[in-house]
Image (tube, rainbow, N blue to C red):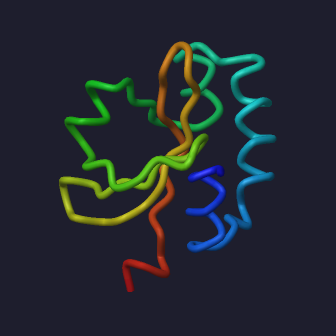
Amino acid sequence: MNPQADIQSQVGADPTEDIRRTLLVQINAMPGERAALEAEHGQVWDTKELGRDFVVVEFMAPFVVVRRKADGVLGSLMFQHHPRYYYGWQPDSALNS
């Protein structure tokens, strides 16, 4: 008996899982240093900075759903594992209207 499979069958399959797994492999195969990530994506946060600016709502690697502390806007960031950096802030317009 597989408890994880039972949970998934009750909740339903995640339609983004295959895409997220592919992205996760791509991102972590060649992780960027902070300067390179900033050049490509703009602002970058390490774990401490993330906690300063956001409340984490949910992790769905390589994404994290967050609420920005400054104004309560809900959105998402991408992240890489080593070194752990968060980047690519995108407010979720559908949830913030």
Residue ID at (56%, 14%): 82
Q: Quadrant of residue 26?
A: top right
x and y percentages locating residue 1 in the rendered image? 65, 51
3 lies above or below 10: above
Left or right: 20 as drawn, with respect to 78 = right
Left or right: 61 as drawn, with respect to 15 = left
x and y percentages locating residue 46 in the rendered image? 38, 24
Residue ID at (60%, 41%): 62
In this rendering, the count of numbered labels is 0
User: Which image quadrant: the C terminus?
Assistant: bottom left
Q: Quadrant of residue 35?
A: top right
Left or right: 36 as drawn, with respect to 73 = right
Q: Nearer the viewer, residue 43 or 47?
A: 47
Q: Nearer the viewer, residue 27 or 73?
A: 27
Q: Nearer the viewer, residue 15 or 9?
A: 9
68 lies above or below 25: below
4 lies above or below 28: below
Q: Which residue ends up furthest to the bottom in the rendered image?
A: 97
Q: Quadrant of residue 91?
A: bottom left
Residue ID at (56%, 63%): 7
Q: Which residue ends up furthest to the front in the rendered image?
A: 1
x and y percentages locating residue 84 in the rendered image? 48, 21
Residue ID at (63%, 19%): 36
